[in-house]
Amino acid sequence: MNIHTYEKFWLAASMVLIVGFILTITYGAVGLGIAMVDDSSPTVDPDNLDDHPGFADPGVEQVGENEYEVYVRAVQFAYFPGEVEVPANSEVTIHVTSEDVIHSYSVVGTNANTMVIPGEVASITFEADEPGEYGVLCSEYCGAGHHDMEGTLVVVPEDEYEGDA
Ligand code: CUA
């Protein structure tokens, strides 16, 4: 059978595209270290957060010399605490959960961004290197006040850090 040269070219090009799509999807799923909130995440009872060791009194907790854990509650339409303050040159893990509907915790200008699902604990760990102030936004539509749902993440110079704000 004689296949026209152009036909061969388009066949080859479409094969390359298909393989390309598969590679892109595979890379996106496993190559970037992106983790979805899933069954393996710790769970909490969204109706009884007051009984949870971390979420009962949300805020910043020092857990090591330069290590901090932060518990944040998301609720229509705010974060508690709204402002999180951590010292520079530390490793920070933020645990967020929701009391009501799906929200997100998205640190503007960084790749720290997670969905916040009632009953699940989303955790983000990052190095707070340089002092600076970051906005935190909810990027999941969660109701009439969604656009007002915001917070702040402040990395303060080490010598100015005064503990849980
Ligand atoms: Cu919370 Cu949108």
Image: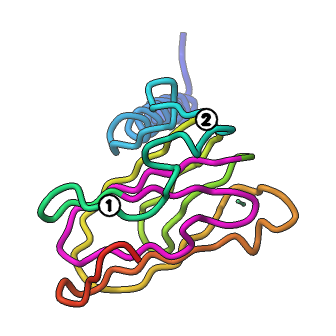
Q: Which residue of the protein is positioned furthest toward the top in this rendering?
A: 1
Quadrant location of the C terminus in the rendered image = bottom left
Q: Position of residue 55 (x, y in %)?
A: 50, 49
**Quarter location, residue 46:** top right
Q: Is residue 92 magenta?
A: yes
Select label 1 or label 2 by which is in front. 1
Q: Is residue 10 magenta?
A: no
Q: Position of residue 29 (x, y in %)?
A: 43, 35
How many numbered marks does the figure carry? 2
**Quarter location, residue 137:** bottom right
Residue 61, disc? 1
Q: Amino acid at mark 2?
A: Gly
Determine the residue positioned at 49% across, 68% down.
107
Q: Is any part of residue 89 visible from this angle? A: yes
Determine the residue positioned at 32% across, 54% down.
125
Q: Which residue of the protein is positioned furthest toward the left in this rendering?
A: 65
Residue closer to the observer: 132 or 56: 56
> Which residues make up the magenta segment?
70-99
Determine the residue positioned at 61% across, 33% down.
45
The answer to whether 150 appears left or right of 38 in the picture is right
- The CA span between labels 1 and 2 is 22 Å
Quadrant location of the N terminus in the rendered image = top right
